[in-house]
Amino acid sequence: MRKIIGIGETVLDIIFRDDRPSAAIPGGSTFNAMISLGRMTSRHFPQTKVMMVTQTGSDHVGDIVTSFMEENGVSSLAVTRNPGTQTHISLAFLDKDNNARYEFYKDHASASLREDTVEIVGFGADDLVLFGSYFAINPKIREYTRTLLEKARNAGAVLFYDVNFRKSHLSDLSDTFENIQENCRLSDVVRGSSEDFGYLFGTADPAEIYDRHISPLCRNFICTQGAGPVEVFTPDRHMSFPVEDYETVSTIGAGDNFNAGFLYALLAKNIGGPDLETIPESVWKDIVCIAGQFSKNCCQSIDNYVSRDFEVL
């Protein structure tokens, strides 16, 4: 049975409306996706193990985060609880259109992962691995994340890399750019928003991004553009899929849940990494549609994940 493994950071998201806090919920880009996957697989694929490789502080917020994972079908066995540190905090300020602006309070220099993480995870063929954001390029723990990704690759797992590069990390780009490139080389699919790539490469044109920057490293590329179409590139095809227009309560977790839906579709359709270059466009359309449904459901609540009763149409 396939496993789904997330590698990324955890934070406590404090959400503000009109500059007043309205909610505080566990979050983090990969974390949000894994909670949605835990909720869905526990109902529809109960034999599929969902687990998260991450770190938290040894504080009460860390207790909240790990308990929340277990309550939502995500194993916390591979979580590193770092003594004497505090769990990261994210402030999300929603504007009148419910789009979020972020401020982060994180101590990346104290990041670490437990030595036995690889053994705990036990990567297998066709396991689905989601990773990304600064956690996946942080020089402080690069030795650990590289080992995890290489072990997953060598085991035949499917690696999905969400670049998710924030403007706040532009000052770190010279120290992390090689790690971004290495992550792309190790991946079966690279996804990012046009905004991400604007920061990284100075262009938001999906075709230019794929031809010049992604295709030499990874064969399959997905570029999301907010309300614009989802652009998908494989070595032989360029496909464009429109995005449904809908009212949003919060855009926090929109891209994260697109990732969750993409992996859920691979699980439900029993698609492996090598299949991505040969499946017909109609199947790609179904996968992107499911990913969009996950994203839509998340955006229609204040939570960062799909609702507990969400169903794919």
Image: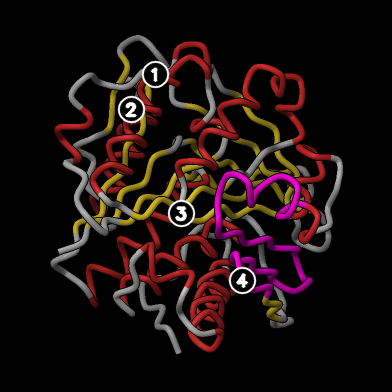
Q: Which mark is residue 143?
A: 1
Marks 3 and 2, how far apart at CA: 17 Å
- Sequence-wise, the earlier of marks 4 and 1 is 1
Name the front one of labels 3 and 4. 4
Is 270 situated above or below 131?
below
- Residue at horizontal 76 percent and vertical 57 percent from the top: 99
Kindly state the secondary structure of the residue where label 2 is placed.
helix
Tell me whether circle 1 and circle 2 mark residues in contact (CB < 8 Å).
yes
Tell me whether circle 3 and circle 4 mark residues in contact (CB < 8 Å).
no
**Type of the residue with mark 4:** Asp
Kindly state the secondary structure of the residue where label 4 is placed.
loop
**Type of the residue with mark 1:** Glu
Assign the C terminus to one quadrant of the image: bottom left
Is 135 situated above or below 227?
above
Q: Which residues are magenta?
A: 209-238
Is 213 situated above or below 271?
above
Residue bearing mark 3: 188
Query: Residue 145 location, x and y as percent?
Result: 39, 28
